[in-house]
Amino acid sequence: MRLFTALLLFAFAANASAAIKTQEIPYESADGTKMIGYFAYDDAKSGIRPGVLVVHEWWGLNDYAKSRARQLAELGYSALAIDMYGEGKHTDHPNDAKAFMADALKNADAAKARFQAGLDLLKKQPQTDPSKIAAIGYCFGGKVVLDMARAGLPLAGVASFHGVLATQTPAQPGAIKAKILVEHGAADTLVPAESVAAFKSEMDNAKADYKLVIQPGAKHSFTSPDADKHKGHGLDVGYDKTADQKSWADLQAFFKEIFDVKPEGA
């Protein structure tokens, strides 16, 4: 009897895991950059559902960004981790990451085109409700999604986790259409208090609908379990399980608000 029960539990777990489908999808931006998207959805869920873009850290489209797409799929969303660097490239060395990020941000129009290409790809997926799209980003990706909101892209919402908040082109009053969630670590020395204050002033002046959540004691990269291994490169970063879990719960509440639906598993 125990063996039979164990087999049933194993089969149930296997089937639950198998319901999450993932695939790599090649696509191209208007500037000719060839990119690779990582798409995830729950195959056991019928019909269309809200879509979420995931924008990677400065490391590039690595396993962490892909894992977030899978987690979103488990919550009932259609999720696409997009590629802002091209060809799916990523790195573990900060010098390479800095160069990749600088290249991706040197031309604002090109960066917007790469994001737009990912947005278009997500909307085309048969599982996605194209009228309900949000974007989340981590570190570099946080800056990207905030910049897309500043540019007035028609997104239901954007969420930044330990993202870069500074900008050279502040949002103009009435320009931001998306609701905004920012999750920031109180001990983040890479995005100092001055940047946080400037961001709040910018959002207030732009009359944006935003929420800034400060996670006590959290450093930069507080959501990434791999953050601690980068301390060897002299980076003041660190994983914070409590802040990670709290910020993820905040995101789910944010999605419930902007999509006005309750996804499975939330």
Image (cartoon, helix red, strand yellow):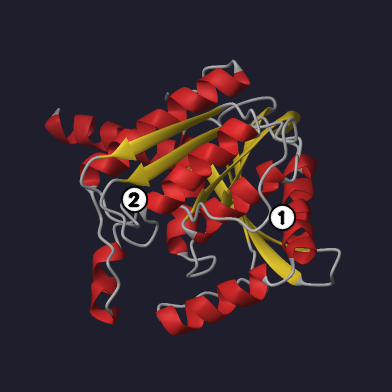
Mark 1 residue type: Phe
Q: Is residue 55 visible?
A: no
Q: Which residue is mark 2?
A: 223
Helix, strand or loop at mark 1 = helix
Dot placed on the residue nearer the N-terminal end, 2 or 1: 1
Question: 74 or 152: which is nearer to us?
Answer: 152
Residue 108 coordinates in the image, percent (x, y): 74, 63
Circle 2 crowding by C-alpha within 10 Å: few under 14, some 14–19, many from 20: many
Q: Residue at x 69, y 54 (%)?
A: 169
Mark 2 residue type: Thr
* Location of residue 113 with respect to 6 vertically, above or below: below
Residue 111 coordinates in the image, percent (x, y): 72, 62
Question: 255 or 45: which is nearer to us?
Answer: 255
Q: Residue at x 27, y 41 (%)?
A: 243
Circle 1 crowding by C-alpha within 10 Å: few under 14, some 14–19, many from 20: many
Q: Is residue 103 visible?
A: yes
Q: Residue at x 74, y 47 (%)?
A: 119
